[in-house]
Image (cartoon, rainbow, N blue to C red):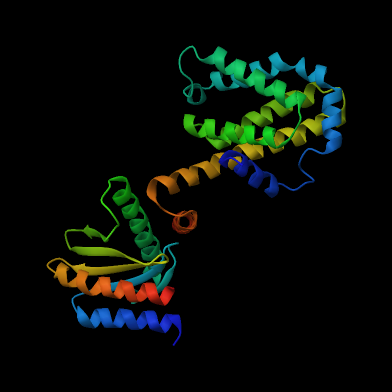
């Protein structure tokens, strides 16, 4: 199975486990889109933003002595974008509407992030 | 090797050897050292008269600072004329780039001021070969200063935000695309 197919399968499983999720993106830590179910036009920008949020989140956690970064949660009036570290090379970004079960999203997305980390080696 | 020296080396590797000062340029400049040192006051005055005559560039300076800045430029000119143009000299030029970042001076101004100095030298040079040698030297020094200026900004943002240089370049590329879209 190619890496792309494996990543798409992780995305599919995550969407199946949490149907209220509105979009999933896997990016490299350099900000390049690796796999997503977002429209192609949005993928490049979302990948760069997710990697940027992760990099900044890690640095804030480090500088503020918060320990290793778990996730970055951006909460807007209409919903969430949550960014997870997926090993040394990957970033997982998950979009959800306001009122979504954030606990369930964290639970499933953290497992997905671990799988992505293994796939990216 | 220090980070600054490494940046200077990167800049020098980028510059085509045809454009860099040649060994014979160093000889020409050394032969005309006294002539060039005689231009020190003219270079310093032309440089700072231009900056102080224009309010947006004058704003880079603190009140009463000009004599100190003139002394620093005179020292730069002396070292630049006397050589040698070795790694230490290029690392020093990279350091000049950092000083300009700290002061918030645009790299566009660095290029313009170098051009001003070159024009003055070309006007006063006693031979075309001296003008050409100084042209290559000043162009290369400016290139190293500007390279260090840009590189330092990238490294600083990378350090502060935790973004890799590759991610910063991705963001820059996306931002440029957006700007080009109008």
Height in image: B162 above or below B37? below
Is residue A104 rendered to the left or right of residue B34?
Answer: left
Q: Looking at the rendering, which quadrant does residue A118 occupy?
A: bottom left
Of the 4 image quadrants, the one containing the N terminus of chain B is top right
Of the 4 image quadrants, the one containing the C terminus of chain B is bottom left
Task: Name the residue nearer the viewer: A90 or B99.
Answer: A90
Image x and y of residue A28, in percent: 42, 67
Write the residue at 51% across / 31% down. B105
Given the current orientation, which residue lies at the most extreme bottom position? A1
Can residue A103 be seen in the rendering of this structure? Answer: yes
Write the residue at 26% across / 61% down. A70
Q: Looking at the rendering, which quadrant does residue B118 occupy?
A: top right
Write the residue at 32% across / 73% down. A114
Write the residue at 45% across / 57% down. B167
Height in image: B3 above or below A47? above
Is residue A111 rendered to the left or right of residue B2?
Answer: left
Image x and y of residue A19, in percent: 19, 79
């Amino acid at each position: 199975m190619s890496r792309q197919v494996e990543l798409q399968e992780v995305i599919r499983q995550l969407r199946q486990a949490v149907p209220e999720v509105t979009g999933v993106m896997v990016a490299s830590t350099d900000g390049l889109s690796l796999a997503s179910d977002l429209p192609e036009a949005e993928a490049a920008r979302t990948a760069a933003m997710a990697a940027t949020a992760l990099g900044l989140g890690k640095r804030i956690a480090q500088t503020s002595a918060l320990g290793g970064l778990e996730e970055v949660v951006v909460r807007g009036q209409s919903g969430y974008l949550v960014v997870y570290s997926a090993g040394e090379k990957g970033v997982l970004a998950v979009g959800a509407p306001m009122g979504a079960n954030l606990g369930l999203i964290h639970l499933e997305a953290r497992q997905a992030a671990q799988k992505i980390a293994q796939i990216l080696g | 090797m220090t980070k600054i020296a490494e940046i200077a080396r990167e800049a020098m590797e980028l510059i085509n050897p045809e454009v860099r000062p040649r060994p014979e340029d160093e000889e020409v400049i050394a032969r005309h050292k006294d002539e060039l040192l005689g231009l020190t006051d003219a270079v310093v005055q032309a440089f700072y008269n231009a900056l102080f005559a224009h309010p947006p560039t004058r704003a880079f300076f603190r009140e009463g600072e000009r004599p100190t800045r003139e002394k620093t430029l005179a020292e730069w000119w002396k070292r630049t004329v006397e050589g040698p143009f070795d790694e230490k000299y290029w690392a020093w030029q990279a350091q000049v780039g950092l000083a300009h970042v700290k002061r918030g001076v645009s790299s566009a101004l660095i290029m313009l001021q170098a051009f001003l100095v070159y024009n003055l030298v070309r006007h006063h040079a006693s031979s075309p070969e001296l003008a050409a040698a100084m042209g290559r030297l000043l162009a290369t020094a400016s290139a190293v200063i500007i390279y260090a200026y840009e590189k330092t900004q990238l490294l600083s943002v990378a350090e502060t935000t935790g973004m890799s240089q590759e991610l910063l370049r991705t963001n820059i590329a996306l931002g440029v695309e957006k700007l080009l879209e109008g």
